[in-house]
Amino acid sequence: MSGGDGEDLHRRPLPDQGDDTGVGSVGARYPRTVLATCCLPWHEDGTLDEPMFRRGIRWLLEAGLRDLYVFGTAGEGHAVGDATYRSVVEVFCEELAAAGATPMIGVISLSVQTIAERIAYAADRGVRVFQISLPSWGPLTDRELRSFFRATCGAFPELEFLHYNLARSGRVVQPWEYAELAAEHPNLVATKYGAGDPEVIAGLHTHAPQLRHFLTEPGFFAGCSTGPCGLLASISSSNPARALAYFRAGADSDQATLVALHRELAGMMTAIRDVVGPARLTDGAYDKVVAKLVHPDFPLTLLPPYQAAGDGAYRAYLGVLRARFPAWLPPAV
């Protein structure tokens, strides 16, 4: 495993926002780090493959990615029922507790009542950090947006919340809106933004520097020039040590390394979209291809009705990495 060097990189203290050269003069409410998702492996009958799930969690932890979450889009938080939610939370929390790591649980639902119930369930089991998304039945009005945050952040002041900001919800929260929400809710600590729009990213650091903003690989490249963003590892999680090197290059303003690694990651993102095909599948379809690089027996299946990438796409992507980006392959692949 390559986790030794990567873990040292990850744990070396970083300057917080008040000491950084980026925009802002106050420290952010959440550490600057690398967030990584845990995909869920399903048996053919749609039940959780618990041994495979545990193996995937342990591999990421041992490889140096200590800040893990479950139930984002890639973790199919939008597709699970209550019973599956509870069983996954139990396993996930048990594994992270054994490693001395802090679990983050995503909660996605059209119902704020269901969101609150799921938060309460996980909180009763010791979870203190949650990832929330806006209900997606229709775009929320300004008043409804504030009502949502009062029903989550406001209802659980003892917990911390990261807001997953995505267009799929029907409304992308704007940087100045985060400034207002952060002022009202001290336990809103971070955001997650995957679209990579440089104007939005700059605005996040300008208007809401008290929040830690986590960006996927392309956005992280842009974000490092405007503020101390965190990295949301997606395609880079196939090799955690290299993902951590990309993060460190951005944190240290090592432009040569940052540019070189970003060029590779951009090529990998193009490659995985090419091999999966023209249909725009949900995030989990792509992330499970990456997970299968690490564990070749990892099932690509998604919960219905969502379409998975096929084994042919996995084999083609593996071939691209071997030919063009071998440094991003997991150890021993």
Image: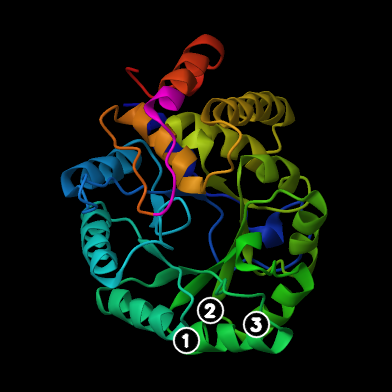
Q: If you read the primary sequence from the N terminus, does the residue marked by circle 3 or circle 1 appear first?
A: 3
Amino acid at circle 3 = Leu
In the displayed image of the protein, which residue is found farthest to the left?
A: 51
Task: Write the residue at 66% across / 26% down.
Answer: 257
Quadrant housing the C terminus:
top left
The span from disc 3 to disc 1 (Cα, nearest Å) is 18 Å
Compared with 253, 146 (above or below) is below
Viewer-proximal residue among 158 and 87: 87
Quadrant of res 118 = bottom left
The secondary structure that dominates the magenta segment is loop
The span from disc 1 to disc 2 (Cα, nearest Å) is 6 Å
Whether the residues at callouts 1 and 2 have beta carbons within 8 Å, the answer is yes
Task: Write the residue at 21% across / 45% down.
Answer: 43
Amino acid at circle 2 = Asn
Under tag 2, what secondary structure? loop
Which range of residues does the magenta coloring cover?
305-314
Can residue 11 be seen here? The reply is no
Under tag 3, what secondary structure? helix
Residue at mark 1: 157
Point out residue 293 in the picture as x, y percentages from the top left corner. Answer: 38, 27
Residue at mark 3: 145
Residue at mark 2: 187
Can residue 186 be seen here? The reply is yes
Under tag 1, what secondary structure? loop
Task: Write the residue at 37% across / 27% down.
Answer: 311
